[in-house]
Amino acid sequence: MMRRTIFNEDHDEFREMVREFVAQELVPVFDSFEENGKIDKSFLAKMGEMGLTGLQIPEEYGGGGQTDTFKYNAILTEETAYAATSLGTLRVHQDLVLPYIMSYANEEQKQRWLPGMAAGTMMTAIAMTEPGTGSDLTGIRTRAEWDGEQYILNGAKTFITGGVLADRVLVVARTSPFDENNRRGGLSIFVVDVESEGFEKGRELEKIGIKAQDTAELSFTDVKVPAEDLLGEEGKAFEYLSHNLPQERLTIAVNAVASAQAAINFAVEYAEERKVFGTSLKEFQNTKFVLAECSTEVQAAQALLDNALEAHDAGELSPADAARLKLFTTEVQARVVDKCLQVHGGYGYILEYPIARLYTDARVTRIYGGTSEIMKSIIAKDMGLSASRK
């Protein structure tokens, strides 16, 4: 494997700490998290005590203080993926939601929310997708109407990652009527307390993969949201969401590459142990060639990812390049995990083998955070290619 040059000694020490934590604390209980469909909140609080739930939160709010780099977040994701585990919805809480709070919350809001987020005792989620809208945020129907004293929130959301464990949910809602001439306008973000009257957590959705990551339906019936829980300015949600998309797609790519590498590691281990007709599976030319192909693809994806991590820390990762990154790395993940499962033969289809989990978990990465088709549209637009010809 090519030497990675983007990490320093501090990163390496952090990685060793995380690797030990994953092996000793996470791996032994991970099956129970998958069975329960969510990670235990007590486990998240334990991670908070170790400083692992608020890496990019400033120290004055109880966080890790790594405000100018995403690399520590990436290391945490990589090490959990290498072990064929995950941290449930922590990635959403830390990698997706936190940037909105850091960028758009006022000081009073930061004082209220960041300490709990850093401690792992106040979990968060973000609710954008609605039944029937999919990736089209301009089609959001959930509405928040000002009644002179507070906003009144009504509507429904689906596929909300972290919706079960969340204490606060960033809800994207329409605060002014839909305007065909300004489809991206009229949307706002509210940081809603899940204990509010009329806030309902509906079905916990059963998925084919990433089972330890809770996913729920949410509904709002005349939920009263105080003005001080509006995030940023009214009507600016689409701008805010677009600003954070590169990091969302970056974190998906980090997991995709690490999961693909994990698949190779498990396939190599299996090939070394498995005997076929009295010969080690690793001695067959087909096995060697397949794993060589996989290794080459992952190394290419790793190089692209590391370049993107550097660009992101420098504030230079564009939405189009983030789309290229997500498209390439998730497609590589799909191909590599599939080939590595094939190396396992029938055993690859048995859930006690980690490759099976990696296989089912991989399927959604080409869907969430923007489908591969959406990524291609973004890239094509960046290339100056029109969406349609008349």
Image (tube, grey):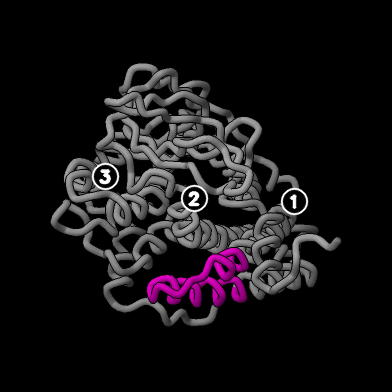
Which residue is tagged 3? Answer: 117
Tag 1 residue? 345
Q: Quadrant of the C terminus?
A: bottom right
| Residue sitting at x 48%, y 26% | 218
The x, y position of residue 9, in whole percent, is 29, 77
Q: Which amino acid does the dot numbered 2 rest on?
A: Phe
Q: Is residue 361 visible?
A: yes
Q: Earlier in the sequence, mark 1 or mark 3?
A: 3
In terms of depth relative to the viewer, which is nearer, 91 or 210?
A: 91
Residue 53's place in the image compared with 175, above or below, is below
Q: Are marks 1 and 2 in contact (CB under 8 Å)?
A: no
Q: Earlier in the sequence, mark 3 or mark 2?
A: 3
Query: In the shown orientation, is residue 16 left or right of residue 4?
Result: left
Marks 1, 3: nearer the viewer: 3
The magenta segment = 299-325
**Between residues 31 and 96, which one lies in front from this camera angle?**
96
Graded by Cα atoms within 10 Å as few (under 14), some (14 to 19) or many (20 or more), the crowding at tag 1 reads few
Provide the residue designation for mark 2.
238
Q: Residues within 10 Å of mark 3 (few under 14, many from 20)?
A: many
Q: Secondary structure at mark 1?
A: helix
Amino acid type of the residue that numbered disc 1 sits on in the rendered structure = Gly
Residue type indicated by callout 3: Met
Percent position of residue 308, x then y: 50, 73
Does the magenta stretch mainly form a helix, a strand or a loop? helix
The magenta stretch spans residue 176:
no
315 over 234 or under it: above or below: below
Viewer-side label of 3, 2: 2
In the current view of this chain or complex, which residue is farthest to the left? 60
Q: Quadrant of the N terminus?
A: bottom right
Q: Is residue 35 left or right of residue 22?
A: right
